[in-house]
Image (tube, rainbow, N blue to C red):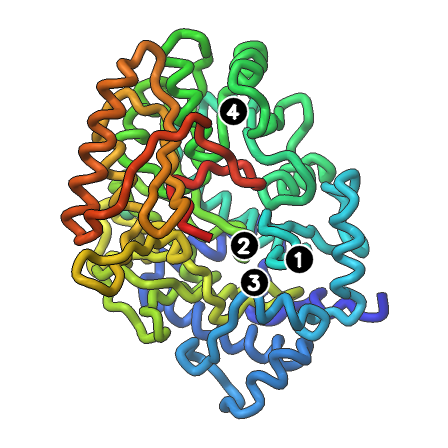
Amino acid sequence: MTSEPHRHPPGSGAATTPWTLARDGRRTLRLGPRALANRQRERLAAMVDFARAHSPYYRELYRHLPQRVEDTALLPVTDKPTLMAHFDEWVTDPAVTLDGVRAFVADPGRVGERFLGRYLVTTTSGTTGHRGLFLLDDRAAAVVRALSLRAARRTLTPTVTARLLAHRMRSAHIVATSGHLAAHAVLARSRAAGRLPARHSHVLSVHSPLPDLVDELNRYRPVFLGGYATVIALLAGEQLAGRLRIAPAVVSLLAEGLGDRDHQRIRSAFGAQVINSYGCNESLALGYGCTSGWLHVHGDWLVLEPVDADHRPTPPGERSSTVLLTSLCRWAQPILRYDLGDSVVLRPDACPCGDPLPALRVRGRAADLLSFPHRDGGSVRMVPMAFETLLESIPDLDLFQIVQTSPTILRVRIRYAAGADRERLWASVRKELGALLAAHGAGQVEVEPASEPPEQSPGGKYRVVIPLA
Ligand SMILES: [Zn+2]
């Protein structure tokens, strides 16, 4: 522990606690778009300086750049595999090593503890080779909490806030509880730090059988229910069937690109305010959903650039191939112009909800594109959203998952609603999918029913589309 370079990171003004940071953020937004852009520019310049001073990797990568950088477009693009391959040079604290962090996360018992006494560690669920390891210093954690406060202030109605407080925020969180995966690690850290009293919060495993989740929730009766959107959608089905009987004031969805139909169904099943939050390991608070159905991103603490496959800017209103993230608060492990892999659409005009922060929609991950042989030769690529919206239009499918098992075979896993006419439903699934594929010129693709139900990824999510490996 020879150095603590993050004690006074630059570019964050005098604010140091989540509350002063949140107040500072409100002031910036009140001052208008120019003030927001100025904040972003100042923080970017400071972060680039900091990365050059403390990260050998960035010092080398940026050696030909001008001394002051106020525009992300000047920065080369980075990504997870490259940064993970240079982990020890990437981090800004020489006491942090890949071996050290790996040993720490290998022990699930240490979740909630801080690595070296000063870093929250989160991991992605990827297979060992592609697994990302992310460190958050205390100062960055304070920014994340400030941004969560902002999201709560801007999304919750006064009535809902009053109900939450009246029940002491009795919350249930359904997350992947294995190891140091982001949602679990953040909850465990909040509990260890005393910010989330264990008796007012319940953490349930996303891998628990559905009847067990239902039983536990019926016993606990949360006023706040949070978790992956697909799992909450299943619970909405249980609530509608009368097996689950809870009355949360708020249902908070970790955004996975859930369609409008599921959103509506969750709202009516629970009679609750449904909010979307958008985050990832690289930026634990990216944005929050508004009443107009857009995600507003925290533009004073991050930059998101929608780009095409060659990393050229995608105009607002058009679907990007991927998006580049620049975090302005990750001092321990700078994330600068980092290829996040999400396809997004940036809203070209002001959002009707009145929120001045940039608004976008996530259109699924570029990695989830399906590719088929075209009937006239060549190949055709299709986005997961095409399949999602199609299958969502068929009633009584609680959950579905499309697995490509060969270039021309799609296996469809379905969880039917109770009492559904399976044969009739399968006939319409096959017909609709066949028509969609034919419309894209992929008519030879076979659609077959799977005997197994949809499966969760190691991180507990249900991916709607699993392309051929
Ligand atoms: Zn909005």
Q: Circle 3 sits on which residue?
A: 329
The answer to whether mark 2 is within 8 Å of ligand 1 is no
Taking the view exactly as shown, the residue that stands out farthest to the right is 2
- Which kind of residue does numbered mark 2 sit on? Leu
Report whether residue 221 is seen. Answer: no
Of callouts 1 and 4, which one flags the residue occurring earlier in the amino acid sequence?
Answer: 1
Q: Position of residue 16 (x, y in %)?
A: 62, 57
Of callouts 4 and 2, which one flags the residue occurring earlier in the amino acid sequence?
Answer: 2
Mark in the foreground, 4 or 3: 3
Q: Which mark is residue 135?
A: 1
Question: Would you say the residues marked 3 and 1 are in contact, meaning their CB atoms lie under 8 Å apart?
Answer: no
How far apart, in angstroms, are the residues tagged by discs 3 and 2?
12 Å
Q: Position of residue 236 (x, y in %)?
A: 39, 20
| Apparent side of residue 441 relative to residue 104 in the rendered image (left or right) | left
Mark 1: secondary structure:
strand
In front of the other: 147 or 91 = 91
- Which kind of residue does numbered mark 4 sit on? Leu
Q: Position of residue 311 (x, y in %)?
A: 36, 74
How far apart, in angstroms, are the residues tagged by discs 2 and 1?
20 Å
The quarter holding residue 398 reads top left
Q: Circle 4 sits on which residue?
A: 165
Mark in the foreground, 1 or 4: 1
| Apparent side of residue 449 relative to residue 117 in the rendered image (left or right) | left
Mark in the foreground, 3 or 2: 3
Report whether residue 168 is seen. Answer: yes
How packed is label 1: few (under 14 Cα within 10 Å), some, or many (20 or more)?
Answer: many
Q: Circle 2 sits on which residue?
A: 21
The answer to whether mark 4 is within 8 Å of ligand 1 is no
- Which kind of residue does numbered mark 1 sit on? Leu
Residue at point 52% right, 19% down? Answer: 210
Of callouts 2 and 1, which one flags the residue occurring earlier in the amino acid sequence?
Answer: 2
